[in-house]
Amino acid sequence: MTTPLPTDIKLHKASKTLSLKYASGEEYQLSAEFLRVHSPSAEVQGHGKPILQFGKIGVGLSKVEPAGQYALKLTFDDGHDSGLFTWDYLYQLAQRQDALWEDYLGELKAAGKSRDPSESVVKLML
């Protein structure tokens, strides 16, 4: 099966989301934070050993541009702009968004990290 291509892509800077619409009628809203922590870049994916991203609750998207006919290049306002989001990867993220987000929140908790960059989690050993 071929990955569907979005028929409409919109960057909503105020709500910090990227909306994707498909010919099938499917519509997805992906937050900038979700996209940032799931970036396909080596900085995030760690060459096979993913590196947990934290403190990204306020990140936004500053630019979205096509990368050839196969992907989008997303530029985040924290300076991150590497990693190309292929149509297949974006579609997988959109379809699995809820499960991936729950997994991410669990990983943050297990690592004692926070989505908020101004918050530090301290574990007391009593």
Image (cartoon, helix red, strand yellow):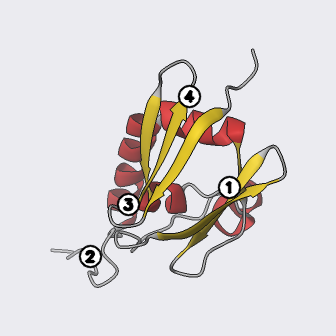
Q: Work out whether 36 lies above or below 28.
A: below
Mark 3 lies on residue: 108
In the rendered image, which residue does mark 2 sit on?
Answer: 121
Discs 1/3, front:
1
Q: Residue furthest top?
A: 1
**Other residues around mark 4 within 10 Å, as few (<14) / some (14–19) / many (≥20):** some
- Point out the residue furthest to the left here: 126
Q: Which residue is mark 1?
A: 40
Residue at x 15% of width, y 74% of height:
126
Residue kind at label 4, given as amino acid type: Tyr
At a point 32% along the width and 59% down the height, the residue shown is: 109
Residue that badge 4 annotates: 22
Mark 1 and mark 2 in contact? Answer it, CB < 8 Å: no
The amino acid beneath tag 3 is Leu
How far separated are the C-alphas under marks 3 and 4? 32 Å
Q: Residue at x 44, y 37 (%)?
A: 28
Judge from the rendering whether residue 111 lies leftward or rightward of residue 4; answer left or right.
Answer: left
Q: Earlier in the sequence, mark 1 or mark 3?
A: 1
> How far apart, in angstroms, are the residues tagged by discs 4 and 2?
40 Å
Which tag is nearer the camera, tag 1 or tag 2?
1
Q: Outermost residue toward the bottom?
A: 118
Distance between the alpha carbons at the discs numbered 1 and 2: 27 Å
* Rendered location of residue 43, percent (x, y): 68, 69
18 over 58 or under it: above or below: above
N-terminal of the two: label 3 or label 4? 4
Horizontally, is 62 left or right of 89 in the view?
left
Q: Position of residue 117 (x, y in %)?
A: 34, 80
Q: Secondary structure at mark 1?
A: loop
Q: What secondary structure is marked by label 2?
A: loop
Q: Secondary structure at mark 3?
A: helix
Quarter holding the N terminus is: top right
